[in-house]
Each structure stands twice: as C-alpha cells, then as structure tokens.
Image (cartoon, rainbow, N blue to C red):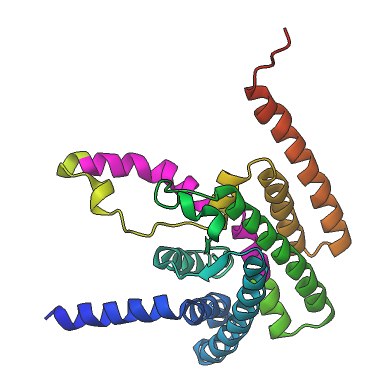
C-alpha cells in the first residue's frame, strides 16, 4: 500500500535535487503570492502564483549563473541545492505570518574548492570555511545592491514585477546573514539529547544524513566573525528602513554607520577582550 507512495516521494526528491532552481522558484512564487488569497481571492491566486514563480525563476537563474562565474574565476565550483527542511520553514512562516515573513534561502549553496584543498580532503572534514564565508559575504553584498536597485524601481513604478523582485532580494538578503542552524540548535539540541537517552539510541549516527535547517548566514557567522557584525547590523537596519519606506540614501547611510559601530564594538568587547597581552 505504501510502496507506490514511497516511490512517488523518492521520484519527487530526485527531481527536486536535479532541478533545485525550478522547485525553489515554485515555492518562492507560492510565498510571494500567498497574501493575494486574502486581498484578491483564490481566483487570482493561481495567476499570481504563475507570475511570481516565473519571476523567481528568472531571479534565481541570473543570480546563480553570474555568481557561479565569480566562483569559477577563483577556481572553485558553485552548486545550488534545495534543502527540504528549509522549504518546510518557508511554507510554515508564510502561513503563520500571512505572507509577511518570507524565508528565502538563496544563500544556501555549496562551494567545491579547487586543487588548493585537494590534499586535505581525506584528512580534514571541514576545509575552506573562511573562503566559504568570504563567498557568502560577496553574495550578500550582491543582494544588498540588487535590493537597493529594485527598491528604487518599485518606488518609481508600482508594478508586480518590481515589487516581487524587491521582496525576493530583500528577504534573500535578510536570511543570508541569519545563522538559522545555530539559533535552532540552541533549542533543539537539548530535546535531541533527551530523545536519544529515552530511546537508548545514538541519534547522531541514525540521522547523520539528514539535511538540517541552514542558510548562508550559518557559514558566514562561523567563518568570518570579524566582518559578520558589519553585514548583520547593516542588513537588519537596512531591511527595516526599506520596509518603512525610508529614502534609499538615508537608509544606506544610517545602516552603514550602525554597521561600522557594531563591528567596532564586536572587536573591542569580544575579539580583543578575549586575548591576553604579553605586555605587563
């Protein structure tokens, strides 16, 4: 009875892994169109779904194509993947927030490094984390620029294309600096350990291949903590100001000042405070 269902799910999973951009585009289109159910009715929802899915596909294709060229120029390989757990979070947040909070994980990608890390591949499980974080910083910077461009266009022309592109870039930018895996692990790890004790099993081995919730912000935070506060503070305040319809120049300048103050505070109170000086 369950065999056909299992086969269908496996086929769907294979298709998603083979065409992650198409699957992500449909899910992004759903998230962007969800509010239209309450504003325009279900009859227009499917039309908005098609339009927003197509816009998302163009956005993701262009973004990953040209970012892939940047990575390839450095001798590395860029791979976009579709995380099913992240898809669940996208669907969940869209429903519970009535389409106001959108989880767009465009910064969730993998970098396969070139020959410079080949000799360490077998001995080191995690290599090139700082380089991965640097790519995340570049990706976030691209999203910041695109968000500013689409915000300006949507301000001059009230059109669904520019509005959708602005929401795509803004929420992608926002989640690119949020270490989702780290935040959720704080709440999930105690439950995870208790569940393992209850069933008398080592769950780390049982579920070692499970793909957990993560975004580029997780890699960014772990690999480049000295510049992460700059991007994190800038993106958070920049996003809030744009949502509040603040002038682009004012939003950029104020966010930059806050970002610089944040990284200075991080260096002074955390980085340098943790190191003992040799001077007595």
Outermost residue toward the top in this view = 280
Asked if residue 23 lies in the magenta stretch, the reply is no
Residue nearest the viewer, comparing 229 with 116: 116
Residue nearest the viewer, comparing 254 with 100: 254
Q: Residue at x 56, y 80 (%)?
A: 33
Answer left or right for 50 relative to 19: right
Number of numbered discs: 0
Q: Residue at x 40, y 78 (%)?
A: 16
Vertical position of residue 114 compared to residue 232: above or below: below
Q: Pick the quarter of the image with the N terminus.
A: bottom left
User: Which residues are drawn in magenta?
Assistant: 169-196
Q: In which quarter of the image is residue 89?
A: bottom left
Asked whether residue 122 is in view, the answer is: yes
Q: Which residue is drawn at 41% across and 43% down?
A: 187
Where residue 12 appears, as percent x and y from the top left, is 33, 80
Q: Which residue is drawn at 24% across and 44% down?
A: 195
Q: Mostly what secondary structure, the magenta segment?
A: helix
Vertical position of residue 273 compared to residue 68: above or below: above
Answer left or right for 264 relative to 199: right
Where residue 51 appears, as percent x and y from the top left, is 59, 89
Q: Pick the quarter of the image with the C terminus.
A: top right
Where residue 5 appears, as percent x and y from the top left, is 21, 80
Q: Quadrant of residue 243?
A: bottom right
Where residue 96 appears, as percent x and y from the top left, is 48, 64
Asked whether residue 247 is in view, the answer is: no
Vertical position of residue 272 compared to residue 204: above or below: above
Vertical position of residue 18 compared to residue 246: above or below: below
Residue nearest the viewer, comparing 242 with 65: 65
Asked if residue 181 lies in the magenta stretch, the reply is yes
């Amino acid at each position: 009875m369950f065999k056909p269902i299992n086969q269908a799910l496996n086929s769907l999973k294979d298709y998603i892994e083979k065409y992650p951009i198409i699957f992500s585009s449909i899910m992004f289109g759903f998230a962007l169109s969800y509010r239209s159910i309450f504003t325009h009715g279900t009859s227009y929802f499917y039309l908005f779904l098609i339009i927003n899915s197509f816009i998302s596909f163009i956005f993701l294709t262009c973004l990953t194509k040209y970012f892939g060229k940047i990575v390839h120029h450095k001798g590395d390989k860029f791979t976009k993947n579709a995380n099913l757990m992240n898809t669940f979070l996208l669907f969940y947040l869209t429903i519970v927030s009535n389409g106001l909070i959108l989880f767009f994980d465009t910064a969730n990608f993998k970098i396969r490094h070139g020959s410079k890390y080949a000799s360490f591949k077998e001995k080191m499980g995690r290599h090139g984390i700082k380089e991965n974080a640097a790519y995340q910083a570049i990706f976030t910077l691209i999203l910041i620029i695109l968000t500013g461009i689409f915000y300006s266009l949507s301000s001059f022309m009230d059109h669904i294309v520019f509005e959708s592109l602005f929401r795509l870039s803004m929420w992608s930018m926002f989640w690119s600096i949020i270490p989702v895996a780290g935040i959720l692990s704080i709440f999930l790890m105690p439950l995870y350990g208790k569940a393992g004790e209850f069933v008398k099993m080592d769950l780390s081995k049982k579920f070692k291949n499970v793909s957990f919730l993560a975004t580029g912000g997780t890699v960014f935070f772990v690999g480049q903590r000295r510049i992460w506060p700059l991007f994190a503070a800038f993106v958070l305040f920049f996003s809030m100001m744009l949502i509040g319809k603040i002038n682009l120049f004012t939003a950029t300048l104020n966010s930059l000042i806050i970002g610089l103050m944040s990284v200075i505070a991080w260096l002074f109170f955390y980085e340098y405070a943790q190191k003992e000086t040799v001077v007595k």
